[in-house]
Amino acid sequence: MKKLLSTLLFIMTAISMAAQMMDPVTFTAQLKNTGGAEAEIVFTGTIDRGWHVYSTGLPADGPISATFNSGKMMDGVEPIGKLQARGKELEQFDKAFGMELRFFEQSVTFVQKIKFTKPDYNIDCYLEYGACNDEACLPPTSVDFKQKGKSPAVAEDKKEEAKKDDAAKAEEKAEESAADAASNDVANEDTSAADSTAAAANADSGRLADANQLWKPVINELQTFGGQGTSGEGMAWWLIFLEGLLGGFLALFTPCVWPIIPMTVSFFLKRNKDRSKAIREAVTYGLSIVVIYVLLGLAVTLLFGASALNALATNAVFNILFCLLLVVFAASFFGAFEITLPTSWSNKIDEKSESTTGLLSIFLMAFTLALVSFSCTGPIIGFLLVAVSTQGSIVAPTIGMLGFAIALAIPFTLFAMFPSLLKSAPKSGGWMNVIKVTLGFIELAFALKFLSVADLAYGWHILDREVFLALWIVIFGLLGVYLLGWLKFPHDEEGNRTNVPQFFLAMISLAFTVYMIPGLWGAPLKAISAFAPPMNTQDFNLQHTSTEARFKDYEAGMAAARAESKPVIIDFTGFGCVNCRKMEAAVWTDAQVADILNNKYVLISLYVDDKTPLPEPIEVEENGQQRTLRTIGDKWSYLQRVKFGANAQPFYVLLDNEGNPLSGSRAYDEDVAEYINWLNGGITNYRK
């Protein structure tokens, strides 16, 4: 479990650092001939101060090892042995991974020996490495190396080729007279062929010119028009705080926390005859709880950085791990097992708190509470950190944990100040288990969201919109049935009646279930548009005002726009983009908006997280560095950055047939009237 958690957090780290576009390591690559039929591919790296690059051959559950990888076009050479690391290798125990790690600082050289197997060779390979500093880590980073040439592999082949050349020359002389006789007959044909070749070359150059025009940067023109710029998906800090506060209150009413409150308050009151001192100690106890959980959020912030980049947040491993993690949490809340920390930890901390005095004793008591209650608070904390880790704010985990801790600490302080309130407080009972099971259903529903993101990005089509909705309908329907007392889990009390709060919660859950049913036939379901897969994954759709992009390829869409003499709207979106789904459900379903998009524009949706491999990798230069675009999503993300100067989704821009902007860009905004005015303004400018 520890290894799994470490690996999961490392993936979050990688995504967060990619979002910040850091580049602390610079590599160069070259081919070094060592004589004969062997050579070395040498990757030389310079590492910024405070950063380190991991060595080769680290354990599978550790950080990213340096590895050598062959490309699809590799021919005429084969690797000899494994990748070798050269330089001053350091070794240190890493607490996060629980193992000894080997790494390099300041500089490192990785060498891969190769052997030539053919006279002509084509080297297509890359080095993949991982780098970290004391606060965060980079995602897996590749260094490409490509080179073609003649190799010293088969020297004898050259002699054979020379003999064949001599024989060919003799044969050419014998046929020379016949060729002269026929030359006059084919002269006119050659001239005609030359003209055809020239015409084809002119056509190709024309297409190339069109492509260059379509990809020409228009960042300054967009700024001239103005507009909204880009929009992230981050939540406001106060919303993250409220989310943490809600999680804390939910954790408070669980069997692992609520029964401890009267015991703790009574302990402080009996321990001190002076009531004011008892209150001070209880307040200190509450503040200690806040400090402990805020330190947890701060640790996540410092170690794992800010939020995830869409290109990696849609990574299958990342999302499937989160899905499985939430399923495990749900099973725990359903009573299948308990997620507990080693009892030796809580016992040792408890012993320390008894043997010490003063503030340290109280702090250790609070720490014991955190350990003992982990079976209930752990899944809630895990779910909270998963939710806020992709919000784009580096302080989001800390703010979330602050809200969680305050909610958890309030009753301990409040009941110590006013002990009489304990008499009117709800007694421990089966209702607390109902809260746990309800949270289990909710976590199970959100697990499907993470699985859906991976499914969309990789095109598996195992969780299309109607399948997703069917599962949610079953989950929330069963939740309503459970709250009415018709469904029992192993740890539920027999004969427990449905109380009034449970009845109203059951009614809400069942009503929500009924609300989702029309979505199976294409109803937009705006309330859950941020979670459900997009409408274009729906097999059966009766919705008449739905809007779907005619093209998902930029060049093909622009060609259609020229043929139809229509303006273009580019929709930079993503399978894992929450705000994109909100815009499609809240704005694009409007009848007037749908009519404009479907009939007056050519709509092109470009998914920046599409993992479909390109037919051939594309080499580009960006910010003075060579990059390789390997997937369709890479290509569209590159287009958005270089042409429009943006990298967040949703991002909408209106263009003419030559790729020039007709208006300012637009981001996430559910104001339908403003969206219609923006679209009409683009049409007006196009006609001018």
Image (cartoon, grey):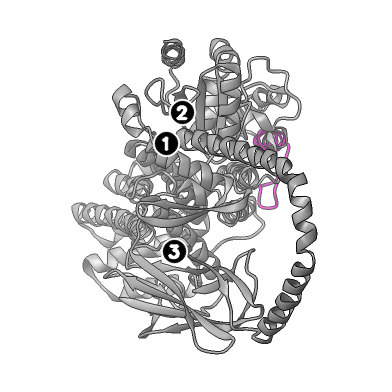
Residue 427: percent from the left, percent from the top?
49, 44
For image coordinates 42% across by 16% down, the residue present is 678
For image coordinates 41% across by 41% down, the residue present is 641
Q: Quadrant of residue 101?
A: bottom left
Disc 2 marks which residue?
A: 659
Extent of the magenta region: 470-496
Q: Nearer the viewer, mark 3 or mark 1?
A: 1
The disc labelled 3 sits on which kind of residue? Leu
Say whether disc 3 or disc 1 marks the residue closer to the N-terminus: 1
Is residue 544 shown above or below 259? Answer: above
Local SS, label 1: loop
Disc 3 marks which residue?
A: 371
Asked whether, in this view, residue 120 is left or right of residue 681, the answer is right
Q: Give the label on residue 637, or none.
A: none
> Do the CB atoms of the residues marked 3 and 1 lie less than 8 Å apart?
no
Is residue 76 shown above or below 365? Answer: below
Asked whether, in this view, residue 478 is left or right of residue 100, the answer is right
> Do the CB atoms of the residues marked 1 and 2 lie less than 8 Å apart?
yes
The disc labelled 1 sits on which kind of residue? Lys
For image coordinates 74% across by 50% down, the residue present is 183
Residue neighbourhood size for the residue with mark 2, other residues' Cα within 10 Å, grouped as few (<14), some (14–19), many (≥20): many
The Cα atoms of the two marked residues, 3 and 2, are separated by 59 Å
Say whether disc 3 or disc 2 marks the residue closer to the N-terminus: 3
Disc 1 marks which residue?
A: 216
The disc labelled 2 sits on which kind of residue? Gly
Residue neighbourhood size for the residue with mark 1, other residues' Cα within 10 Å, grouped as few (<14), some (14–19), many (≥20): some
The Cα atoms of the two marked residues, 3 and 1, are separated by 58 Å
481 vs 536, nearest the viewer: 536
Local SS, label 3: helix
The Cα atoms of the two marked residues, 1 and 2, are separated by 8 Å
Is residue 238 shown above or below 678? Answer: below
Local SS, label 2: loop
